[in-house]
Amino acid sequence: MLNSVVAGLTSGGVYALLGLCVVLTYRLVAVVNFTMAAVGAMGAFVMVSLMDAGLGVWLALPLGVAAGAALSALLGAVLVRWFGDHDERTKAAVTVAVYVAVMAIGLRLFGGTTTGARRFPAPFDTPAFTVGGVVVPQSVLVSLAFAVLITVGVGLLLNRTLVGLRLQALSERPATAEVVGIPAPRLAVGVWAAIGAVTTLVILLVAPRLGGDFSTLGNLIATAFAVAMVGAFRSLPLTLAGGLVLGCLEGLSASLSAIQQYRGVVPFLVIVVLLWWRSRHEVWDTAHSR
Amino acid sequence: MKRSHLAAAAAAVLVLASAACSGEGGGADGPIKVGSINGITGLFQTPEVPQAVKAVFDEVNAAGGIGGRKLELISKDDAMNPQRSTEAAIELIESEEVVALVGSSSAVDCGLNRATYSNAGIVSVPAIGVDPACFTSPNIAPVNPGPFKLLTAMLYYASETLKHDKVCMFYTTLPGSGGGIDAAIKEWSDLTGKALTVKDTSVGQGDPTPYLVKAKGAGCQAVLYNAQVGPWFAQAKTQGMQDVDFIMGANSYTDANAEVIPEGMNAYAGTEWQPYTDETLPGNDRWARVVDGSKIQKTAFSQGAVMAADVFVQVLKTVKGPITRESVTEAFKTMRPIDYPMVGTPYVFGPGEAHNPIEGSRFVKVQDRKWQVLPEDFIVPGRK
């Protein structure tokens, strides 16, 4: 059983990365982004498709990341241009619609689970060390390091820099931000592009562990939301911890035969329990006004 | 609420009544209309299946048709959408008045439409039976072994051909297929006297590492597996499981999957028809000729399509008198077994309440990111 928990823990890093992307988007542009994983998967598949066509990895990687960034920027531009004054719910609904569209297009372009499986480069595949019966590859350490980098880096960016201050203003009071002279639309689209780029990198990093086809990668959004929920869509460190907890829970549930059938439900249970826990002392009206 | 119930009941009565009246299956001298329900868009895509069935029909038509009548295929895309699948079946039976369904390939058709087919007295010969209901219905008999017979063959291959004592199973299961899986395992146990070392049917999405660690801990020598290929093998390699024989089902037998399995891993797949990657195998020459002639994608699914169409044509030729839905159904229910070289056992429809005529599997193994056909012929459990 200990081995299973350790095995689950090794996936904590990749889960944390997914959650961090969601929280990142929410902190920076105040949108619950359902398209996140699908956009990242689009970028990742552009990259592997270019590699299949004979392009070297160092040329394909920036092109793939650029594709993810461009798609994300396009979505951002739509949201800023046409839905800038709408509330969060409407924006989330727009991303749901776009998610459905991107998934359908991706499925057409890149095939389903069996015919569309692709080989993703796994440069950090070599074993780093062994715990009990579990081999821990370098990629686990890389994922964790990347997750910590995002957590600390974005934390510093938001709290210590002028750009960060402007981004916070933009996220929380977009109209006011524009009135005081922050170039809101341009900044927002730039942030969307950066999020798209980071998400593509994250999807590339998680693909060898979590899925090699478009629909599986695009649907990782459910897991990502579960992890982001631990940090209440705000706290980056808690989100990082959430990823590790989710990994542990999955490992544990795989080892206990009584509950292994329900392993897939774990992320949703985490969401439900956390929603309940967070709202236990809340008063309506104030609590839900963000 | 009440009114909508009434309307639904009225509609159902109408459908039943018209089903009872429209057993003609086209006129006596127009084309013989044949239907199929295929996933063309959506999550389960098999556009090559209706194309291949049509190619066989074109061949028959070019040679003068059946008794001077041409064969016409009417294929409906259900996009794996239950609503569309149900509508497609009713439309084919009611409006198009097809005489039979041949070469269906839908993940939802059998389960939804089995009662419709029984009520209309029409037979369906799917190219690919996907869901369990395809193998447990009185009016459906697919030309593939299906998931359960295939599982028995895979277990048999692991324990008898590869001679492993510790056979484990890590599966993802569809709702409602648990009973079929247990029955398949029991069939294998009864034949060999062996039992599974680990049976885990909870594999889903997410990191496969906990399962691999569990298999490693249990000392599994052979692992039967049917879920996502890429991450499973990437992580199995990381965990150093190069000495384990991983045996996958026919759904994993695709070129894309062979590409994603890392070097050094032992990955097998049980196929439902002669492996399509080798055109010199018995029966594959005909299939290759048909699909090449019409420039159709070469997949295992198109093999099922050609076989379903061939079987249908062969049975159709035995019909005495006018070709109608009744006479075609009668011909299938009383047909003699057909030896078809692309599968392990003869195909027969017959009168029973459930049909799973094709058994056994031929195995392939990944070598240098390509599937290689293994020398053993079809492994049919219990057949020496």
Image (cartoon, coloured by chain):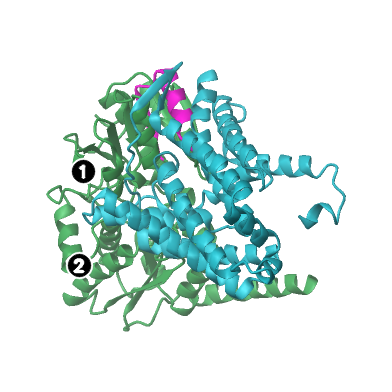
Which chain is drawn using green?
B
Q: In which quarter of the image is residue B196?
A: top left
Q: Mark 1 lies on which chain?
A: B
List x then y, in percent, for residue A228: 62, 45
- As drawn, the residue found furthest toward the top would be A132
- The residue depicted at 43 percent of the width and 54 percent of the height is A41
Query: Please, what is the three-letter code of the amino acid marked with disc 1?
Result: Lys
Left or right of residue A166, residue B82 in this image: left
For the point 50% across and 20% down, the residue is A3
**Residue B336 in view here:** no
The amino acid type of the residue labelled 2 equals Lys
Can you give x and y, in whole percent of width and height, for residue A247 in the image?
55, 33
Query: What's the chain of the residue with tag 2?
Result: B
Can residue A124 be seen here? yes
> Residue B137, which numbered label?
none
Image quadrant occupied by the C terminus of chain A? bottom right
**Residue B363: percent from left, percent from top:** 25, 38
Q: What element carries label 2?
A: loop
**Residue at the (53%, 65%) spot, across then down:** A189
Q: Which of B28 and B8 is in front in this view?
A: B8
What x and y, as percent, mark residue B289? 15, 62
In the picture, one chain is cyan; tell me its letter. A
Q: Which of B144 and A64 is in front in this view?
A: A64
Secondary element at image label 1 = strand
Instruction: Based on the picture, tell me whether residue B68 belongs to the magenta stretch.
Output: no
Residue A278: quarter of image: top right
> Label 1: how many residues lie within 10 Å, few (<14), some (14-19) or many (20+)?
some
Position of B30 with respect to B185 (left or right) is left
- Magenta-highlighted residues: B207-226
For the view shown, which residue lies furthest in the left direction? B280
- Foreground mark, 1 or 2, reads 1
Residue pointed to by mark 1: B370
